[in-house]
Structure formats: structure tokens, C-alpha cells
Amino acid sequence: MTELNLISQLEENLKAFIKLIPVESLSSQWQLEVQLFYAGESAGKTSFNLYGYNREEAEAIARGVKQNSFLMKEIDEYLWGDSD
């Protein structure tokens, strides 16, 4: 199995390099790594474990991060959670 690499515009100044990595020992587990860039500067890296998805489903999640309200909420909290 090979990994999937994508670049996605999440918001006006927020871009993400997204890497979907299969977990070798489990065919239905994936690691979704999201490296964030705000206004061209590195803003950090976070990851998510995806359980119970086949390859097509996991790729659809990776390609649709911007449309996934749960993932976007987690990314927002990662970026801005301590700024209150």
C-alpha cells in the first residue's frame, strides 16, 4: 500500500499538506497527517487516526478535509485553542 499526499486550501490564508498513511498491520486503519501553513508560514502539524475505512473511504476523507466539520473543528482548536 502506498500513501496519498495532497495540498489543500482550507481557508483564505490556511493551507494544509495532507498525508494519508496506511497502517501496515491493519487494512482498515489509516493515519491522516495534516501539516498546516498560515500565510505561507508553518503553523504546526496534527494527525488523526481513521479506523474502519477501506482505501476509497479514507482517501475521500483526506480529499474532503475542508468539508469535514469535525476535522476542521479539531484543526481550528489545534491552531487557536490557546489564544483565548
Image (cartoon, rainbow, N blue to C red):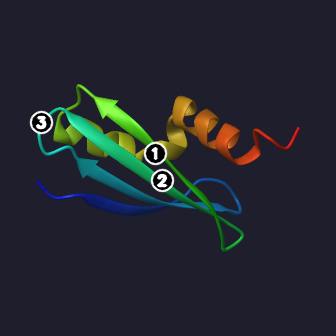
Answer with mark 3 or mark 1, whichever residue precedes in sequence. 3
Residue at the location (38% across, 46% down)?
A: 32
Task: Pinpoint residue 47: horizontal percent, then vertical percent.
Answer: 46, 45
* Number of residues whose C-alpha sits closer than 10 Å to that of mark 3, classed few (under 14), some (14–19) or many (20 or more): some
What's the residue type where badge 2 is placed?
A: Val
Answer with mark 3 or mark 2, whichever residue precedes in sequence. 3
Residue 47: numbered disc: 1
Q: Which residue is mark 2?
A: 34
Q: Which residue is mark 3?
A: 27
Q: CA distance from mark 3 to mark 2?
A: 21 Å
Instruction: Name the quadrant of the C terminus.
Output: top right
Q: CA distance from mark 2 to mark 1?
A: 6 Å
Tag 1, which secondary structure? Answer: strand
Check the image and report above or below for 65 versus 4: above
Q: Marks 1 and 2: in contact by CB < 8 Å?
A: yes
What's the residue type where badge 3 is placed?
A: Ser
What's the residue type where badge 1 is placed?
A: Ser
Residue at the location (52% across, 39% down)?
A: 67
